[in-house]
Image: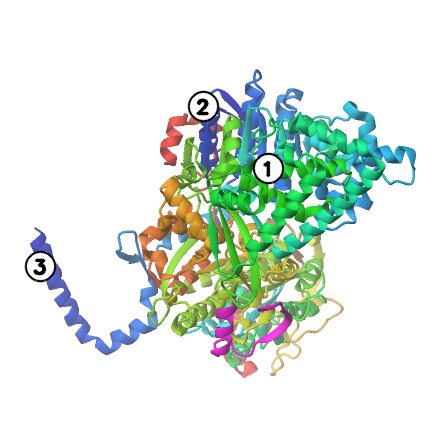
Amino acid sequence: MANNIAEKRRQQEEDDDEEDGDLDGWGERNYADERSWEALQEDESGLLRPLDNKAMYHAQYRRRLRSLSTASNSQHIQKGLIRFLYIVLDLSRAASVMDFRPSRMAVVAKNVEAFIREFFDQNPLSQIALVIIKDGVAYSLTDLGGSPESHVKALMAKLECSGDSSLQNALELVHEYLDQIPSYGNREVLILYSALTTCDPGDIMETIQKCKKSKMRCSVIGLSAEMFICKHLCQETGGLYSVALDESHFKELIMEHAPPPPAIAEFAIANLIKMGFPQRAAEGSISICSCHKECKVDHRKLVLVANKALSILAINPAFMLLVQNANSTFALTATFTFMRVCTIAQVARASELHSEATLHR
Amino acid sequence: MKFQIEDVTVCFPYDHIYPEQYSYMVELKRALDAKGHCLLEMPTGTGKTIALLSLITSYTLSKPQGAIKLIYCTRTVHEMEKTLAELKLLHNYQVKHLGPAAKILAIGLSSRKNLCVNPNVLEANNRDSVDAACRKRTASWVRALSAENPNVETCEFFENYERTASGAVLPPGVYTLQDLRAFGKEKGWCPYFLARHMVQLANVVVYSYQYLLDPKVAGIISKEMQKESVVVFDEAHNIDNVCIEALSVSVRRQTLDGASRNISRIEQEINRFKATDVNRLRDEYKRLVNGLALSGNLPGSDSWLSNPALPDDILREAVPGNIRRAEHFLHVLRRLLQYLTVRLDTEDVEKESPISFVASINNQAGIDQKTLKFCYDRLHSLMLTLEITDTDDFLHVQTICDFATLVGTYSRGFSIIIEPFDERMPHIPDPVLQLSCHDASLAIKPVFDRFQSVVITSGTLSPIDLYPRLLNFHPVVSRSFKMSLTRDCICPMVLTRGSDQLPVSTKFDMRSDPGVVRNYGKLLVEMVSIVPDGIVCFFVSYSYMDGIINTWNESGLLKDVLVVGYVSSFHLVFLMILLFQEIMQHKLVFIETQDVVETTLALDNYRRACDCGRGAVFFSVARGKVAEGIDFDRHYGRLVIMFGIPFQYTLSKILLARLEYLRDTFQIKEGDFLTFDALRQAAQCVGRVIRSKADYGMMIFADKRYSRHDKRSKLPGWILSHLRDAHLNLSTDMALHIAREFLRKMAQPYDKTGSSGKKTLLSQEDLEKMDGSGLQERLY
């Protein structure tokens, strides 16, 4: 019996050898690239087996389901629909580490791109801005805006990393911008943090208190390990703190931030905001698309429309009352109405494809 | 929650209990039932203290016929306060649920320095001068004097306390040191003497080891404790060293010089008294003829010295005739000093047994053994007679008498070692005469004999069978408990090789090898880049730490040292805060020094750096202050690296003598003892990072010798059970990989109560549901 098995194994090994021979060059490179050995673990008896992250994934999945079900059960969860989100990317030295393939920076950029698109799909009324930390300072890459393309383009052009990372500088910068946002907007910061340290010019605890005071909801996704200061920041400001296990987990974590979060209690009084949609100034002739500019019409707030088609479709000066921070059913109705407008617009767009192309060229 | 352990209803102040706490209580209860001693090992962070307190108090409540007193010994004042705070919580809970019948009196007792409320006394900064300042105001003759002369300062708190006399009692409750001070201030009573008085009546007393183990103190404080007491030694892994230190004396040149100054002063005093008050000295003489036991009937505040030998040994005998008269006693002391001075003037290391030492004193100085034995008590009596209050000035002569009494009393288990210089610095003459005790069981024997149950407990008591041999007692229960964890939150690793596969070790012939030093440096540099917040590194000794840091620096591994705070000490340069270029990118570096203030400052800054996210590394020394008493829990210590095995300095004469004694008397092999001692230190060091179950941390044992079975197996069970075979023989890059994975895994959210398969938190219903046997099976 034992002989048999040994024989079989030998045969198998030979087979393996042959296969290897065929794919020699490819195999080696692939092997080095994937770092497949890191997915292995030695167990008590000395055998190799794949890392057991399944159980953990499963537990997390169940937890998320549970939190979702509790959220839907309670009638009174209010969601902040109009979000002003600053995404802070840590492009310090630590972002060049290659434990994510090809590097943390590349993985972050790829997923941020996907996130931005997903975000505007789910939050058509919201805006995003990008901030980058590099060489110990933070600077703004794009201002608040509703165009996914411009953000993605700006991000991809700036992908290089160096120097230290400073959480405080980033928070100060974002705070400066977000502090001016009117109170109906949900102020949010999502920090994608590669580094394990922060080199700050002053007392970061004060900055955190400042953020807390101006109701900024700061969330952090770490790429390597849990840091106390990040945890503290999230706890204080009511954000989420998570650490990515691998790329797919990172993607999951970042996508968790796409649906609107619960509104901050103090601003959650249901109130009506007057809104207007742009009017297409001149019919028939090529005009500037007004959706990407901030302006005011008749002292009403103009909704910056994410969906291009919507602005193409000329809606006669119609008002739409949008309820912000109303309870979820109401908000859903409002959103639904809004989405329907978008769909109509898309239908219209199909027929006007040509004119749109010229418009945006 | 309330539950039943056999016939005892245990009141536990929390809603949930860990399974290991439950089984700890079960074992403890059995030991109490058997009225025997026990040894219990349970990892820190599992709520040892509260389990102990709630079981023993509940046990007492359920047995009203024989009230059991609990004597709880801690190592530090800080631990004392923590214990009392927990007891307070428990007491409130018990009173709430069981009514006023559950009321107890629990107090902490500490030195005057911690309890005094008199602002004038507290101005003195160290313990001895606070004691002396107190005596200056409270000694009976001072108070008698102040009755005539109002300018003589007394302590109003003590006066008030004396005036109320027996009326001064504490109402039942739990009193921390702070509560005692507050109570004393409010009532105007001296908290120290109140506490001293209440110790006899209290149900629970929390104080320091010394009050039981050091015969000098134990004679005063713990003499009258009843036999039906349970004595607990918490954090007792070093108890043998405490016992030995309590009976060891070392004499240097300064001691001898100081002592001869003291003797001159005493002589002056004697002459003064002869001129003014001859009767006093004559009374004393008569008292001494009757024996020392009778001289004890002095007021309580005056008893500040006691016999360093075991109580009852000599108290019944009369003082020998040749030292009854004060002048004669001084002559004897002078001769003794002279003899010791001659002995100190030696060129070679000498080792002698007490018997031959006493014989040689007898020959050359003409002092026999019996006279030596009485020295301490005779001095005590003389100083009281002479009404000397500034006792802190007389420490030197006290040391000499202490020495004489110990030499005269014990003939076994001690040796006298005279060293002309420190071996590590042979060119600096520093003669020292040491009377070192080798037998830990001598000091603790009266405790075992006197009290019905003695509980020795700690986080690290491995190997658990060695302690009974060292302390020479027979425990009825000796058990080691494991930690039940919801996730694998400790990750011990044994690193045997650097990335270049060369072995690393601090073995004597390898430690200065550049390859080893480089590999240790590399390990640290790599680790700081992947571990967040705080890292603690332990080295085997100060000199090794200094050496390795210098070599790292010189070899260019840690380029451009940027010294922020630079403090130089007398022979070694200690760097307080260094910022190494390579490490600095990730973390700040802080170093423990032999200076307490500097170290405290460094620790404080280290914590700040961890808090604000900058990250920090703390370099420390095994057996140092930090390794013993400071916690690096949560983000203050995510990783601890133990560079090498912290063996004692094996060429030390004292250690060699002790090893020899242990081998001859207890049949403990030298190697076994050294390994045991080194590994309990290592376990203490790495145990600093885990202080609770919600915490997580990694431990790296960086020495190839840890992978050997004889070394590794002496680590405590709770570390061994997490030390997987795959982590036994790692190189730096493998350890890095494991660390990365571990940190990611630990950062994920988790279920605190544990999944349904293995419960780590038991509620009252859980306990009721499963009968004791079922639980036992699941635990082991």
Which of pointers 3 and 2 indicates the residue nearer the eye? Answer: 2
Q: Where residue B555 sits in the image (x, y, percent)?
A: 47, 78
Point out the stretch of residues depicted in magenta. Answer: B546-575
The residue under label 2 is B34
- Estimate the spatial distance between the alpha carbons at disc 3 and disc 2, rounded to whole Å: 63 Å
Please say if the residues under marks 3 and 2 sit with CB atoms less than 8 Å apart: no
Mark 1 neighbour density, 10 Å: few (under 14) some (14–19) many (20 or more): many
Q: How many numbered dots are placed on residues in this image? A: 3
Q: Secondary structure at mark 3?
A: helix
The residue under label 3 is A7
Q: Is residue B563 magenta?
A: yes
Residue in view at x 78 percent, y 38 percent:
B387
Q: Amino acid at mark 3?
A: Glu
Q: Where residue B492 sits in the image (x, y, percent)?
A: 41, 54
- Estimate the spatial distance between the alpha carbons at disc 1 and disc 2, rounded to whole Å: 43 Å
Q: Amino acid at mark 1?
A: Thr
Q: Is residue B24 magenta?
A: no
Q: Amino acid at mark 2?
A: Ala
The residue lying toward the viewer, choosing from B73 and B605, is B73
Please say if the residues under marks 3 and 1 sit with CB atoms less than 8 Å apart: no
Same chain? Circles 1 and 2: yes
Horizontal arrangement in the rendering, residue A202 relative to residue A242 (left or right): right
Q: Quadrant of the C terminus of chain B?
A: top left
Give the answer, above or below, for where A46 lies relative to B777. below
Horizontal arrangement in the rendering, residue A44 relative to residue B743 (left or right): left
The residue under label 1 is B371
Read off the chain for label 2. B
Read off the chain for label 3. A
